[in-house]
Amino acid sequence: KVAWAPAGRRLAFAIPGGALRDGTGRVGGSDGRAVSGIFVHDRGRGTTRRVTGSEDAHRLSFPEFVGADSLVYLIAPEGRGRPSIFRLVCCVD
């Protein structure tokens, strides 16, 4: 799932932990760190940035814009009896 900002300039999406492989068989980016989180792509600037603190996104994390520059997403519980985490992020760039 992807989410468009109201003006259509930004696109938010999630990359769950372990979803990307770099061709060597290990999960992560070129620097060896995991590539996961909620990302915002700015079509006008041609940039894509990870939302700070969203590295724990997984397959059930779906971002949604709330207004022009804020978004929300849910981190589902990792195990039985654990709570979901609902996050509101203001002023995404």
Image (tube, rainbow, N blue to C red):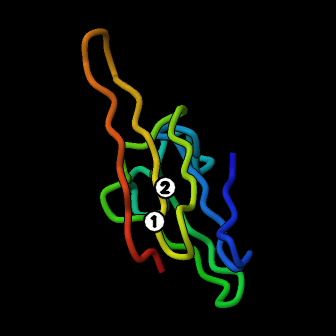
Q: Quadrant of residue 11?
A: bottom right
Label 1 or label 2, whichever comes before in sequence order: 2
Which residue is identified by label 2?
38
Give the residue furthest to the left.
82
x and y percentages locating residue 92 in the rendered image: 45, 74
Quadrant of the frame with the N terminus: top right
At x 60% / y 81%, what residue is drawn? 47
Q: Quadrant of residue 4?
A: bottom right
Give the residue furthest to the front.
67
At x 27% / y 24%, what residue is drawn? 83
Residues 87 and 32: in front is 87
At x 45% / y 65%, what residue is drawn? 50
Left or right of 50 in this view: 88: left
Which residue is identified by label 1?
50
| Amino acid marked by disc 2 | Ile
Q: For mark 1, does the 10 Å Cα neighbourhood hold few (<14), some (14 to 19), or many (20 or more) residues?
A: many
At x 54% / y 69%, what residue is drawn? 67
Residues 38 and 73: in front is 73
Give the residue furthest to the top.
80
Give the residue furthest to the bottom.
45
Q: For mark 2, does the 10 Å Cα neighbourhood hold few (<14), some (14 to 19), or many (20 or more) residues?
A: many
Residues 39 and 91: in front is 91
Rendered position, 35 above or below 58: below
Left or right of 44 in this view: 65: left
| Amino acid marked by disc 1 | Arg
Residues 46 and 9: in front is 9
CB atoms of marks 1 and 2 within 8 Å:
yes
